[in-house]
Image (cartoon, rainbow, N blue to C red):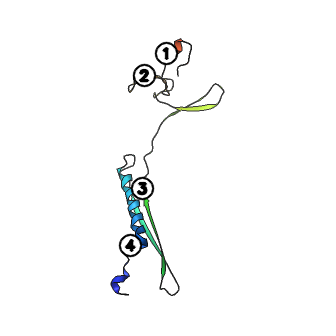
Amino acid sequence: MAQKDLIVDLNDLANGAVAEHFNYELQKLLENIADPNTDHKVKRKLQMNLTLETNEERELANCTIQVKSTPAPRKNVGSVIIIDRDEKGKTVGAELKSGIKGQTYFDTDDTELREDTGNVIDYRAQKEGGNNK
């Protein structure tokens, strides 16, 4: 074997699967960088581990290649849940939309008056003896 034949081309290793795995993980990192829900300051990492296990004669080596990426985690999001009990005493929860429990608010997107949980208040149904949902 000539000296120049001793170098393994990563593009050809495992019939191109190593390069394919590398490109796949790199694409995931690029998408993670472009995601506005991640912190731009967090460093992303792409890691390739090549493990060689040789035979006793040291003529052959089984090669295992692992390619993995470490993306930035998505940013935390927050909300407030109103916790109450229904008419049967079962604990229930709903997201607080108004900012203060029990407060109604005017939805500027659709000009509807809404409960603190976001349900539309229908005054016509209330006058007719219905509920406000």
- Picture coordinates of residue 31 (x, y %)? 37, 53
How far, Cα to Cα, is label 4 from label 3? 26 Å
Query: Along the polypeptide, which appears first: circle 2 or circle 3?
Result: 3
Tell me if 104 is positioned left or right of 5 in this view.
right
Query: Along the polypeptide, which appears first: circle 4 or circle 3?
Result: 4
Q: Are marks 2 and 1 in contact (CB under 8 Å)?
A: no
Question: Tag 3: residue type?
Answer: Pro
Regarding mark 2 in the picture, which secondary structure is present there?
A: strand
Q: Which residue is mark 4?
A: 12
Identify which residue is drawn at 52% across, 15% down: 125
How far, Cα to Cα, is label 2 from label 1? 11 Å
Query: Could you say which quadrant of the image residue 68 lies in?
Result: bottom left
Q: Which residue is mark 2?
A: 112
Neighbour class for label 2 at 10 Å: few (<14), some, many (≥20)? some
**Circle 4 or circle 3, nearest the eye:** 4
How far, Cα to Cα, is label 4 from label 1? 71 Å
Regarding mark 4 in the picture, which secondary structure is present there?
A: loop
Query: Along the polypeptide, which appears first: circle 4 or circle 2?
Result: 4
How far, Cα to Cα, is label 2 from label 3? 41 Å
- Picture coordinates of residue 120 (x, y %)? 48, 23
Tell me, for residue 71, which label it has, or none.
Answer: 3
How far, Cα to Cα, is label 3 from label 1? 50 Å
Regarding mark 3 in the picture, which secondary structure is present there?
A: loop
Q: Which residue is mark 1?
A: 123
Report the quarter where the N terminus lies: bottom left
Neighbour class for label 1 at 10 Å: few (<14), some, many (≥20)? some
Q: Are marks 3 and 1 in contact (CB under 8 Å)?
A: no
